[in-house]
Amino acid sequence: MEIINDYKRAMQFHSGKLAIFYKCIIVGLLVSLIAVMYRIALTMAENYSLLFYDYIKANRLLIVPMFLLLAGMGWLLSKIVNRYPMISGSGIPQVKGQIMGYFKNPWVSTLIFKFLGGIVAIFAGLSLGREGPTIQLGATAADGFGQYLSITRTERKILIASGACAGLAAAFNAPLAGVMFALEEIFTYFSPTILLATITVAITADFISKLVFGTQPVFHMALISTIPLTQYWLVLLLGLVTGVAGVFYNSTLLKTIKAYKTLPLVKEPYLCVIPFLFAGLLGLTFPIVLGGGHQIIENLNFSSTLQWLAIVLLIKFGFSIISFGSGAPGGIFFPLLVIGALIGGLFSHLAIDYAGLNSTLFINFVVLAMAGYFSAIVRAPITGILLLTEMTGSFSQLLPLTLVSLIAYVTADLLKSVPIYESLLENQLAVSEVKQDDHDSYRKIMVETAVHFGSEIDNRCLKDLSLPEGCLVIAIRRHGKDITPRGNTVILPEDHLIVLTSLKDEPAVRLALHKMAEIT
């Protein structure tokens, strides 16, 4: 479908919610089918990986050929990632960059090679998750759908973000977390249209996923007790611990990515060879750390010794950093939750041994640590709270989940740690050029931003704003109605500015409006 630059048609998009509702149902169905196939493929790849390493251990003469095979697989995957950089890593920074106008996504190649690359990485045993890639696969499928059926470029970007939301919902069986992820991490503002789109795709994708995999939560954790209020000081302490641990994770991961680029003997087309060889070594000696970490979660309980928890934590942490730092297709979502669970296991063990914590609360603090660690790293606490609530199937921990996430978030913020996906996006922008063509100067797109209380433009006249060049405020949405802006129109909190700009200037305009309309 041809995307036009017509103002009337573009403005009607915001009031005609029924059309996007139908389109989001289709996107939800499409993304859920891809997510289901990807989840099945990766589950099979992980199972065959364990069988593969068991077979090699039983036939030691095959160890050298095994490492040669892994090196070849790593080399091939490195070449593919080098040829199609949009498939590297989890894909979430690429989705954010695409929404902001930094990247143009060749959706067919991204969809194919992200899918196949994830299977290869998991079969080798790399410590990567399926959730980030599923988010990108969902966004990419929605992008391809939107190229043909979107009326405006704004609608297409909403469909892309909705596809990402559907991917998370299907991957975790967590529709509410998927909706909040789109609002908290991708758009960073609330809009009735966006809310309608994300809820529609999340419910659709979750329904199809549950038809295939059942209604059981992802984590089968029995939360049989609630934490007494007299021991909430332990929850506060855990928030502090996970906040500091999250800052350390972000710092270590970014330094590892930088170190990969400066290795004297390994050039870019060979980076994935390193984690593949590590996977072979661990597959023969310590296979529980391979893959996303489902085996670790299944074996995590109070009978786990402190020594075992510490060893698994150190190896899983290091292997996850090495795996993701190489740029191999795969996410950090699930591995970081597993690392958080191990931190919670250590904390619970110490609290039970030395602080009088009841042993029945062991799993409670494991779940809390996962939420706190996620909040410190990703800096999306509401998503983390909803995610762990839906993944465990228990709503009894909302208060301690909120508390530990808040403390972890504040701790990471005070330590001036940048959210991981923002850092990864900055890294990609530093080495990538914003792809444009000659027509981007006159192709138009609408950019919407919400005005926050106390922001730079709060209660200021439109004529007094230092708007970036190349943009025009064409409407102000206030209480569900569109106001035609004039020079003396006062901008109020909760207003939504609708700005028209060219595709060429979109990234700069989005960044400038973000700084002006939000509290930093």
Image (cartoon, rainbow, N blue to C red):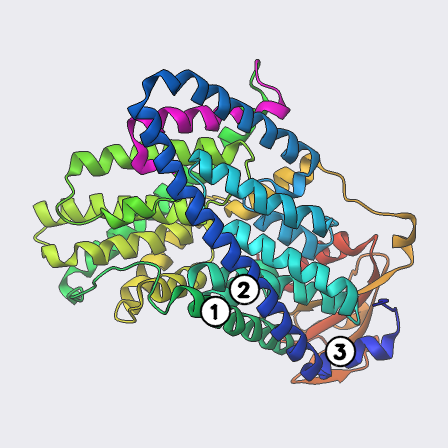
Are discs 2 and 3 less than 8 Å apart at CB?
no
Q: Nearer the viewer, mark 1 or mark 3?
A: 1
Q: Residue 206 shows which numbered tag?
A: 1
Gap between marks 2 and 3 measured at Cα: 25 Å
- The C terminus lies in which quarter of the figure? bottom right
Residue located at (58% from left, 20% from top): 262
Residue 123 at x, y percent in the picture: 45, 38
Q: Nearer the viewer, mark 2 or mark 3?
A: 2
Gap between marks 2 and 1 measured at Cα: 7 Å
* Magenta span: chief secondary structure: helix
**Location of residue 484 (image quadrant):** bottom right
* Label 1 vs 3, first from the N-terminus: 3
Packing grade of label 2 (10 A; few <14, some 14-19, many >=20) is many
The stretch in magenta equals 265-290
**Residue 252 visible to the viewer:** no
Are discs 2 and 1 less than 8 Å apart at CB?
yes
Report the residue marked by disc 2: 32
Residue located at (86% from left, 75% from top): 7
Asked if residue 78 lies in the magenta stretch, the reply is no
Q: Identify whether 298 is placed above or below 474.
A: above
Task: Give 9 or 37, whichever is nearer the viewer.
Answer: 37
**Location of residue 28 (image quadrant):** bottom right
Residue 419 at x, y percent in the picture: 51, 48
Total labels: the figure holds: 3
Residue located at (74% from left, 77% from top): 476
Left or right, 44 with reference to 78: left
Task: Give 247 or 125, whichever is nearer the viewer.
Answer: 125
Gap between marks 1 and 3 measured at Cα: 26 Å
Report the residue marked by disc 3: 13
